[in-house]
Image: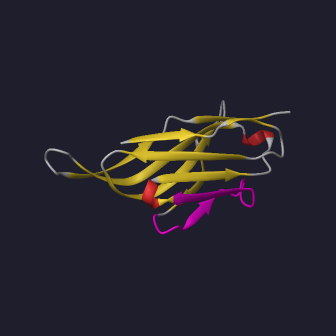
Amino acid sequence: VQLQASGGGLVQPGGSLRLSCAASGRILSINDMGWYRQAPGNERELVAAITSDGITNHADSVKGRFTISRDNAKNTVYLEMNSLKPEDAAVYYCNARGVKTRAYYTGRVSVNDYWGQGTLVTVSS
């Protein structure tokens, strides 16, 4: 299973970006998907998460500005980021939890968690 994140870049304060993260592989289902971020010198923190049923959770620092969504048919999670602030600058990582896959030859079903490679968001004038 691979998670490919995209959409990061340089944006001015007050601007917007949309991050995408697509999971690929022999995926049967994914429970939760989410976005984390890590700024230099800081620990990785949860930004937002969404269940397979569409229940969302956003960090207080981004409520009202960021919106997480997902397309289950595409195994893709999105993060719409508006009114960006300099303190939002970080490497953003997508995460998929409870990923159920079936092995090609054995048919064995496994459940694991996966991380994407990260995409850099820079907020600066």
Q: Which residue lies at the image location 66% right of the left edge and 30% below the top edge? A: 40
Extreme residue in the right direction:
125
Task: Pick the residue in front: 8 or 87.
Answer: 8
Q: Which residue lies at the image location 73% right of the left edge and 42% below the top edge? A: 88
Q: Residue 90's image quarter?
A: top right
As for residue 103 lying within the magenta part, the answer is no
Query: How far from the left and from the top, in percent, is residue 70?
Result: 53, 58
Query: How far from the left and from the top, in percent, is residue 73?
Result: 43, 59
Q: Which residue lies at the image location 66% right of the left edge and 31% below the top edge? A: 41
As for residue 60 lying within the magenta part, the answer is yes
Colouring rule applied to residues: secondary structure
Instruction: Classify residue 105 as left or right of residue 86.
Output: left
Magenta segment range? 52-70
Task: Pick the residue in front: 10 or 50.
Answer: 10
Task: Pick the residue in front: 59 or 77.
Answer: 77
Query: How far from the left and from the top, in percent, is residue 102?
Result: 24, 51
Whether residue 49 is visible here, answered yes or no, is: yes
Whether residue 45 is visible here, answered yes or no, is: no
Name the quadrant of the N terminus: top left
Query: How far from the left and from the top, in percent, is residue 71?
Result: 50, 59
